[in-house]
Image (cartoon, coloured by chain):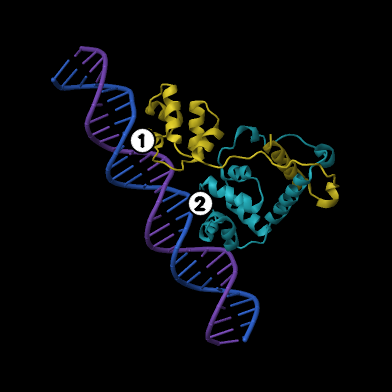
Chain colours: A cyan, B yellow, C purple, D blue
Amino acid sequence: MDNYGEYLKALREAKSLSLREVERRSSVSNAYLSQLESGKIKQPSPINLHKLAKVYGVPYELLMEKVGYPVPEPMKGVSNEKESKLETRLGRITQDEEVELLDYLKFIRNRRK
Amino acid sequence: MDNYGEYLKALREAKSLSLREVERRSSVSNAYLSQLESGKIKQPSPINLHKLAKVYGVPYELLMEKVGYPVPEPMKGVSNEKESKLETRLGRITQDEEVELLDYLKFIRNRRK
DNA sequence: GAGCAGTGCTTGATATATTTAGCACCACTC
DNA sequence: GAGTGGTGCTAAATATATCAAGCACTGCTC
């Protein structure tokens, strides 16, 4: 519910895309994208979130959650549980998972200014 | 995509609830409910859909789907685990980063099901 | 340095979501 | 049969989402 705008901006910058490039790929106007990123839009349409999720390569549900929309139950347990060591706790991860983790880590690190 | 309004109306009538009773239970105005049921609203907020799903006892995802919103797709290629040394690829990660990555991985894995 | 294409951003216009206030129509009770 | 209180529904008002147009700024090329 807080700052999903900053999140979107970080995603875009992590991929080095301009607002107009995202507009081309998602059919969401650059003007609107700018407003999204600066926190001027409270409840964007799930349809647009879905388009952006595709362009940025992040799960649609994650964007929904960031915006503050309810997310289907099976995915509710995103947040908390006790974990310890990375390798031991993760076990083996798939190629796809690794790609996503790397993307996400890049996002985490770009987040701090 | 067509007439989710009729569906909502059928749900309400199946429970023998009046518009105002649903308003009481969901905090969605009876006026708006009426418009929803008569097909005058194209894209209701997921938040309201979630409220109604609760009142009517149907899965939130179903309402989302009926309205025409994208619903989370089960991950397509869970594909073969190509082993990798995660740490060597990620480099050194901080404790905070690790926590976030673990949460995110949990999210990824909960997503498909 | 004029021209041009790209950048993020704002503004005004239009569409749509949602609510408040109120209608007209039923019951039922006194 | 006037007076309640319930029903679905609508109109007007407000809020918000979204886009088209355009601004001011940059960097590049001739």
Residue at the location (60% across, 62% down)?
A: A21
The percent position of residue B32, horizontal first and vertical second, equals 39, 37
Q: Which residue is mark 2?
A: A41
A106 in relation to D21, above or below: above
Q: Which residue is mark 1?
A: B31
Image quarter for residue D9? top left
Residue at the location (75% across, 51% down)?
A: A102
Image quarter for residue B21? top left
Q: Check if mark 2's residue and mark 1's residue have beta carbons within 8 Å.
A: no
The percent position of residue A41, horizontal first and vertical second, equals 50, 51
- Secondary structure at numbered mark 1: helix
Q: Is residue B65 left or right of residue A16?
A: left
Residue at the location (63% across, 53% down)?
A: A55
Q: Amino acid at mark 1?
A: Ala
| Towards the viewer: B83 or A68 | B83
Question: What subunit carries mark 1?
Answer: B
- Secondary structure at numbered mark 2: loop
Q: Amino acid at mark 2?
A: Ile
Q: Is residue B12 left or right of residue A15?
A: left
The percent position of residue B81, horizontal first and vertical second, equals 81, 42
| Towards the viewer: C20 or A75 | A75
